[in-house]
Image (cartoon, rainbow, N blue to C red):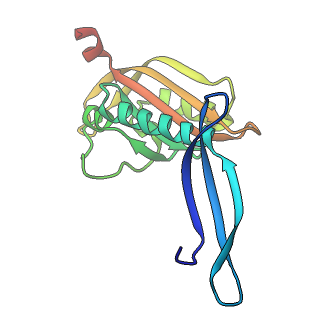
């Protein structure tokens, strides 16, 4: 109506009863007097993308509120996310975004072994078990959990995910 391009999501019902999300992108076409006479653009089925975004949003909410500690690192092993449980168990400042290597809290020599495995980026890498770790105050504990690798379609490492809980806390439950 105002002569600008539009980009919007719509939920549509197909003749078979299925409901899908589509994205409409259109720009107005004008006559000689400047009146809008038509819209030119595209309609794209974005149902799968909307579903993925909904699932990702739900997963973030579950991870944020969960008891298990979750940390995600980029393909270089640098932290990009850590939930509250991760920061609490490791004694990290709750207000600061965690920085540094994902494996910094792991005890030696396990840290070196895991670092070599993660650097290889083996698609089959999936470390599961007890892992000696150290809190920010220097106290040690054993984490029961796993480290997994996420790859893109070419097989390149995209993310590392570390999930654990304090094995002492896990046994007490």
Residue 45 image offset from top left, x and y in percent: 67, 45
Specify whether residue 113 is in view.
no
**Residue 144 vs residue 157: left or right?**
left
Q: Up-down: is 31 above or below 65?
A: below
Nearest the viewer among 36 and 167 is 36
Q: Up-down: is 15 above or below 100?
A: above
Residue sitting farthest toward the right: 154
The residue under the point 61% across, 40% down is 47
Nearest the viewer among 31 and 164 is 31
The residue under the point 62% across, 47% down is 22
**Residue 99 vs residue 117: left or right?**
left
The residue under the point 42% across, 32% down is 106
Specify whether residue 48 is in view.
yes
Residue 104 image offset from top left, x and y in percent: 42, 40
Quadrant in which residue 172 is drawn: top left
Name the quarter where the C terminus is drawn.
Answer: top left
**Residue 63 vs residue 151: left or right?**
left
Nearest the viewer among 22 and 158 is 22
**Residue 50 vs residue 143: left or right?**
right
Q: Up-down: is 126 above or below 173?
A: below
Residue 145 image offset from top left, x and y in percent: 43, 20
Label count reads 0
Residue 17 image offset from top left, x and y in percent: 61, 28
The residue under the point 43% across, 27% down is 163
Quadrant in which residue 114 is drawn: top right
């Amino acid at each position: 109506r105002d002569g600008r391009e539009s980009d919007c999501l719509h939920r549509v019902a197909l003749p078979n009863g299925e409901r899908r999300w589509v994205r409409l992108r259109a720009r107005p076409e004008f006559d000689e007097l400047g009146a809008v006479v038509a819209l030119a653009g595209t309609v794209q089925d974005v149902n799968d993308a909307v579903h993925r975004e909904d699932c990702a949003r739900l997963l973030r909410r579950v991870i944020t509120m969960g008891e298990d500690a979750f940390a995600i690192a980029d393909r270089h092993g640098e932290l990009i996310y850590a939930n509250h449980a991760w920061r609490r168990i490791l004694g990290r400042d709750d207000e600061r975004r965690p920085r540094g290597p994902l494996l910094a809290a792991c005890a030696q020599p396990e840290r070196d072994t895991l670092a070599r495995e993660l650097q290889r980026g083996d698609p089959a890498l999936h470390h599961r078990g007890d892992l000696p770790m150290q809190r920010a105050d220097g106290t040690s504990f054993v984490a029961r959990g796993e480290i997994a690798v996420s790859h893109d379609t070419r097989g390149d490492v995209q993310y590392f995910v570390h999930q654990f809980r304090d094995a002492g806390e896990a046994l007490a439950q």
